[in-house]
């Protein structure tokens, strides 16, 4: 198979014909060639998006008409659920049921934002009281313009849709650059969008490498806003590029999220959520609760249960029945995690289980679900995002100590707390410096609820109403009642 770029309503190869390979991480086999866009392709795509935006062909369309096209895209995704889920599993390695969640969520995200603009159709102008009756002041919300969306490989289609659906709902036009490690479902999404009736140039896809296509897109001065999900290092580069021309960014970056487990919880439930919090999607999750803090009274008991359950996880190729843990997305990530695991063995932490390749796998980028306990607080595995199925545990004695350890990180994306005392849960949640706090669970994510991080985990929010407002500019329109005199340059006196 060979994919193409999608620019100004047509599919075609990159200007220089370049491609790169995409790999099935379970077999290490190449299964597709992906068009590798360069600076000239990015330029064509941004110009198409700019023309489409400036013409008003999309932003001036009544909201109800925009909503109906979003609903057609949602239906296109749902109609292709099986194909898209299997493709996501093949490209990323995740278990098929998890890929199905992603694709269903992607379809729902389009429906959610369609519904939001249907509801707002009458309410796009809001009066404000400026304290002077001679003035009539209103707020208008308008689309921000041309959006560059740059997305990662862990939820390849869903992270693109979290940006596309609200941006299109708001009336923006878009150039999407998915991750070079997993571009396939975004290509299929372009085929779906192509049949949904969007005017040409409103949505454009440029697959390509980060330092070439990605960098050219963030540098392009006709882009009004950059929406990025990925690493902190690349997020910093995106922000720097956006500073030329003072353009808006929203950044969803990494995390090292804590999970505080008190001794009054039900241990079986804690074990279940700890496992889901780090082994779901192979731990390739920005909000993974990778640092677990357990009250010392239940620490040893919990470790024993966690070890037993973790060793029962079924590892394998994502589309095999019952598999709960697939291969790491690509060799580069596999090598990175294996390096971290090797160094961890000399870090002073105790290895409870895992720590390398699972037995019985000759090929594929498989890593066993791994647990370390008594991890020194300055160890790399405790401080750095691993983005793999590796969890670190420590014990605490007091609530204050747990909160202090939880917040002792440059990241602040998510946090979780488990206790049967709900007052305590709220008290702790209030003190955790994170954009998402889960009580008695970890990871459930809702299209309706805002998503994003404190501290180095990012800027801005996706999903919910906040995720829509991120694609709007606010305009103040103020009218003076011209039957009144202003009188600044005309000295008061007898009228002529
Ligand atoms: P990355 O942040 O480099 O890649 C994310 C996106 O940025 C991709 O589309 C990539 O092509 C693009 N990109 C790369 N360099 C760019 C540049 N100079 N200008 C513009 N765009 C650029 O992430 P990578 O290298 O794939 O993964 C490395 C680490 O990042 C992971 O181990 C993990 O810790 C973290 N990560 C976090 C994610 C999250 O959801 N917060 C998602 C993916 C990775
Ligand atoms: Mg792949």
Image: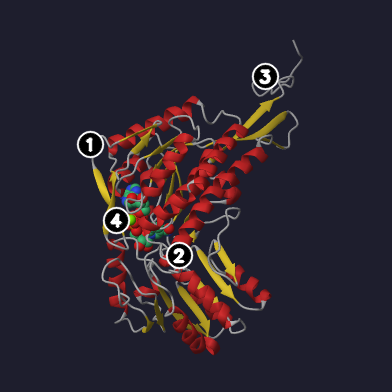
Disc 2 Cβ-to-ligand 1 distance below 8 Å: no
Measuring from the top left, give residue 307's x and y in whole percent. Answer: 44, 83
Disc 4 Cβ-to-ligand 2 distance below 8 Å: yes
Q: Earlier in the sequence, mark 1 or mark 4?
A: 1
Label of residue 23 in the image: 4
Q: Secondary structure at mark 2?
A: strand
Q: Is residue 153 above or below residue 42?
A: below
Q: Is residue 268 above or below residue 142?
A: below
- Residue pointed to by mark 3: 490
- The answer for how far apart the CA atoms under marks 1 and 3 are is 66 Å
Measuring from the top left, give residue 247's x and y in whole percent. Answer: 43, 41
- Residue pointed to by mark 2: 411
> What quarter of the picture does the C terminus occupy?
top right
Q: Nearer the viewer, mark 3 or mark 2?
A: 2
At 45% from the left and 72% from the top, the residue drawn is 290
Q: Nearer the viewer, residue 315 or 386?
A: 315
């Amino acid at each position: 198979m060979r994919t193409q770029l999608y620019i100004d309503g047509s599919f075609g190869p990159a200007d220089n014909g370049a491609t790169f390979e995409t790999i099935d991480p379970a077999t290490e086999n190449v299964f597709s060639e992906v068009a590798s866009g360069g600076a000239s392709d990015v330029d064509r795509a941004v110009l198409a998006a700019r023309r489409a935006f400036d013409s008003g062909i999309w932003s001036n369309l009544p909201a109800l008409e925009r909503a109906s096209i979003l609903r057609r895209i949602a239906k296109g995704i749902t109609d292709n659920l099986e194909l898209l889920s299997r493709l996501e599993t093949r490209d990323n390695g995740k278990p098929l049921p998890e890929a199905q969640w992603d694709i269903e969520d992607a379809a729902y995200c389009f429906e959610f934002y369609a519904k939001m603009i249907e509801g707002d159709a009458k309410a796009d102008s809001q009066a404000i009281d400026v304290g002077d009756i001679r003035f009539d002041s209103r707020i208008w919300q308008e689309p921000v313009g041309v959006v560059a969306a740059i997305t990662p490989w862990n939820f390849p289609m869903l992270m693109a849709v979290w940006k596309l659906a609200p941006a299109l709902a708001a009336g923006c036009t878009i150039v999407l650059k998915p991750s070079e490690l997993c571009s396939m479902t975004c290509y299929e999404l372009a085929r779906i969008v192509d049949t949904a009736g969007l005017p040409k140039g409103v949505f454009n896809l440029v697959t390509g490498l980060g330092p070439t296509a990605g960098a050219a897109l963030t540098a392009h001065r006709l882009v009004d806003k950059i929406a990025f999900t990925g690493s902190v290092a690349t997020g910093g580069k995106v922000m720097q590029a956006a500073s030329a021309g003072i353009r808006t960014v929203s950044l969803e970056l990494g995390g090292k999220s804590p999970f505080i487990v008190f001794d009054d919880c039900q241990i079986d439930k804690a074990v279940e959520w700890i496992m889901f919090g780090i082994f779901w999607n192979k731990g390739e999750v920005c909000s993974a609760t990778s640092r677990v803090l357990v009250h010392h009274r239940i620490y040893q008991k919990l470790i024993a249960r966690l070890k037993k359950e973790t060793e029962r996880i079924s590892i394998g190729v994502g589309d095999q029945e019952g598999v709960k843990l697939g291969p790491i997305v690509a060799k580069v990530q596999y090598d990175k995690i294996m390096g971290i695991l090797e160094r961890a063995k000399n870090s002073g932490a105790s290895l409870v289980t895992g720590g390398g390749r699972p037995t019985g796998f000759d090929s594929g980028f498989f890593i066993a679900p791994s647990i370390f306990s008594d991890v020194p607080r300055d160890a790399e595995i405790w401080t750095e995002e691993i983005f793999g199925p590796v969890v670190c545990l420590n014990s605490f004695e007091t609530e204050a100590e747990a909160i202090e350890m939880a917040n002792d990180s440059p990241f602040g994306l998510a946090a979780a707390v488990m206790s049967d005392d709900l007052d305590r849960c709220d008290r702790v949640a209030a003190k955790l410096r994170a954009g998402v706090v889960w009580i008695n669970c970890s990871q459930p994510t809702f299209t309706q609820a805002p998503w994003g991080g404190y501290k180095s985990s990012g800027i801005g929010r996706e999903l919910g109403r906040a995720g829509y407002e991120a694609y709007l500019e606010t305009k103040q329109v103020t009218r003076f009642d011209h039957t009144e005199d202003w009188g600044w340059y005309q000295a008061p006196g007898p009228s002529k």
